[in-house]
Image: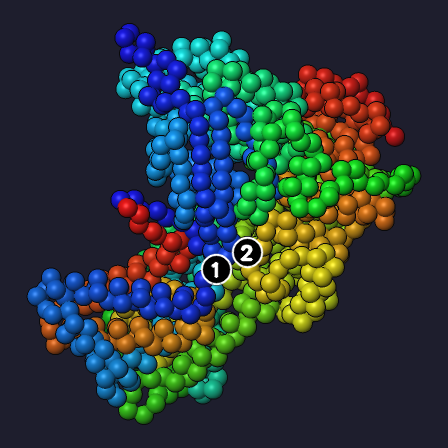
Amino acid sequence: MKRRKDLTLHSQGGKKIELLEMKGIYKKFPGVIANDNVNLEVKGGEIHALLGENGAGKTTLMNILYGIYQPDGGEIYINGKKVNIRSPRDAIELGIGMVHQHFMLIPTHTVAENICLGFKEAPFFYPTRVIEERIHDFTDRYGLKINPKAKIWQLSAGEQQRVEIIKTLLRGASLLILDEPTSVLTPQETKELFTILKKLVEEGHSVIFITHKLEEVMEISDRVTVLRKGKVVATVRTKDTNKKELARMMVGREVIFKLEREKIERGEEVLKVKDLFVENDRGLMAIKGVSFSVHKNEIFGIAGVAGNGQRELVEAITGLRKVKRGKVEILNVDVTNSSPKRIGDIGVAHIPEERIRFGIVPNLSVYENAVLRDYYHEPFSKGLFLNHHYIKEHSKKLVKEFSIDTPSIDTPVKLLSGGNIQKLILAREISTKSNLIIAAHPTYGLDVAATEYIRKLLLKKREEGAAILLVSEDLEEIFELSDRIAVIFEGKFMGIVPREKANLQDIGLMMAGSKRLEERNED
Amino acid sequence: MKIKVERRGEISPKKRFAYLIFSLIIGFLIGGLIFLFKGINPFYALQKIFVGSFGSIYGWKETITKAIPLMLCGIGLSLAFKGKFWNIGADGQLLFGAVLATWIALSLGKTYPAFVVLPLMFVGGFISGAFWGIIPAIMKIKLGINEVITTLMLNYIAEQFVQYLVYGPWKGKTQYGFPYTDNFSSSATLPVIKGTRIHYPTLIIGIILAVLIYIFIMKTKIGYEIRVIGENPEAAKYAGINFLKTTIIMMAISGGIAGIAGVGEVAGIHHHLTVPQQISSGYGYTAIIVAWLARLNPLVVILSSIFFGGILVGGDTIQTSMGLPFATINIFNGLILISVISINFFLEYKISIKR
């Protein structure tokens, strides 16, 4: 019993971090300088936002602080003393904790078991018993509500994040690094997270909050350091700045916040999904009776937290996954369980989620990737052979037209930035197929400039007469682009609302499954 | 002290080549230890190997002879490996090619002229090798059975089948009880370069196939599909590529070319079918190293097959002159393969040691 008494806050001897200084941090990766003479100063008890576009070097900097990377130059000081952080273990001992964007949890184990894992002071026998009580402490203290006996896979993303936070706190973290923590949360969950963070800093913890969302910086942080292309643009107090100024610092130019969208009457029906049932990889029903239609000149947005059936829905429509029951019609042709090639031939563009995993072949060249979905028909090939001459000309045209930044069309695609890979996929898809565009998380992880470009392009395609099905977790994107918004929760639509009648509060509640609109026959 | 492993960016071809040579040298050094254990100066043994294979006209003749089946199997394997289909079964495919070719030779050889029989034997060898290659392809795609296991097991089945034939129904009446089939008639045997065992028609077929397969991989639709499946199966699915069809075609060609190697061995060297160890002496396995050393480029396979042909011949030399078992050279080859494959890791990652 004495042991447990020792397990109080900062139990692992993690000292309180009153001042963290990173001085002149330099880190080079092949072909790119990720951090160029970066200085960062975080005081005890503050929430310090680290703002920057993707590829600005935020995560690299934090990985250096957490000991995952070694800097090529520069020094780190804690409370004025120089420290050498060679591994995450060193970082943890110094009182630094990190919650990664992708959670490092074992889905089939319980919350308590996950927290015990690698926790030095957990006893060898029945390690979870001690932990469970400690978790209750955290619940009382910071509102970190969690059931220690629940299995990870049963938890929502927000709850999993709480487990990660408890894990780092229990290991004595005084400084918490959160890498894009809100990207997987509903608006309500985000609010809860912010409340927790505020309690943490009141208790003397400090937080580094990595983000590229300006609203969040304004709402939660005390100070903000803006990074651009590996360099610090400025460190400012949040109350002395505003969104517009931050955006300019982050991107290096003025950013338009409201996209122009023309009022336009929607046309004929292009996609019609009727009473669809689809299974996921584990053989469980992931889509349970979804019906909707998408029209010409219309963007139909599907909002929802990841893992609620979005992926299965998209795969069923594009022919990648078997439909169990129900019907998919495109331009009045029944394409239920048709092959992806046939569906592509009707003019269905598909911008897949996880673009590097699904959308491209990283080791093949730009021009070979540019025809991934068209290589088999003329003029891209003739008989048995690919028409390399035509393919290369076509690729050059796409690279120019969509301003894809690549050294040449022979460059392996894996060397392109995320934004340029996405542009290439979009270019490939909509250059040959434009009746129906299915876009899954099209701007996920992209920087502001690329995001703006892609959203504008989708709007332009809408005006030109395409029907667009947009799946996104980014509510800002859904509201900005969609004509109608459907909210998906556990494989069902919680409702379909025209954009003008939708408000963030309701959509958020629907995303969490706690509100459902009466089913009514649309159209 | 701390060892850090980090991902590299793109590597220049020059550096790539340097790493490859480096890996070969490391392989030789580690392989040399085996000789050391036997109490033989490894440098002396290595010198013997290379003098034996490349140091004389006789050595060259034998080296090229052994390079022919290695080249053919290596070309076939390069194709399968491009599609990340781990075909360990070239040996069995080679044997199956030899079996059908033997049947054609024995049943048609006496009545038809060479220009009918020999092409038929090559076609037959291709078809039966292809058949043996398609089985694991279907089992993988349709039933999800790992191809490493199926191709390896099919080798044993092919070996035992050949064994059964030459001890049983096909045992020659004129062979004094040896496990040989009757000798092929002259219209079913391949011509050789005078004074050598080099059956040059097979060699020419090999070189032509190297060029054709290179073009097939780089320029055709199916070659493109194979590369996409190999590099990123998820994207292949997304692109709507038919895995079953593509994999079957790929393995038919891969197995078929190994089958042609089998035709060359029976029609060019032995002139009859005999025990599997005689027909192949592990060419299908050595060809795995040949393909990897060539970095799966069929054109480079021509060179790497000659190189390994030489090592096999050198192995024979040290076997006789130093009294080492032939297994020594197999171990040696295995160590080179491990070394060549391991270098992939160092091409992808940078290792740095910090104090």
Q: Is residue B136 visible?
A: no
Q: What numbered label is drawn on residue B148?
A: none
Q: Which chain carries label 2?
A: A
Residue B105 in the image, given as x and y percentages of width and height: 40, 78
Q: Which secondary structure lies at badge 2?
A: helix
Q: Answer yes or no: do the residues labelled 2 and 1 have beta carbons within 8 Å?
A: yes
Q: On the picture, is A158 further left or further right than B187?
A: right
Residue underneath mark 1: B10
Within 10 Å of disc 1 (Cα), the crowding (few <14, some 14-19, many 20+) is: few
- Foreground: A381 or A226? A226
Q: What residue type is labelled 1?
A: Glu
Q: Mark 1 lies on which chain?
A: B
Name which quarter of the figure residue A474 lies in: top right
| Quadrant housing the N terminus of chain B | top left
Q: On the picture, is B97 further left or further right than B44?
A: right
Residue underneath mark 2: A415
Residue at image position (86%, 46%) is: A463
Residue at image position (39%, 28%) is: A79
Q: What residue type is labelled 2?
A: Leu
Residue B2 in the image, given as x and y percentages of width and height: 29, 44
Q: Which residue lies furthest to the top in this view?
A: A1
Q: Is B173 above or below relative to B328?
A: below
Q: Which secondary structure lies at badge 1?
A: loop
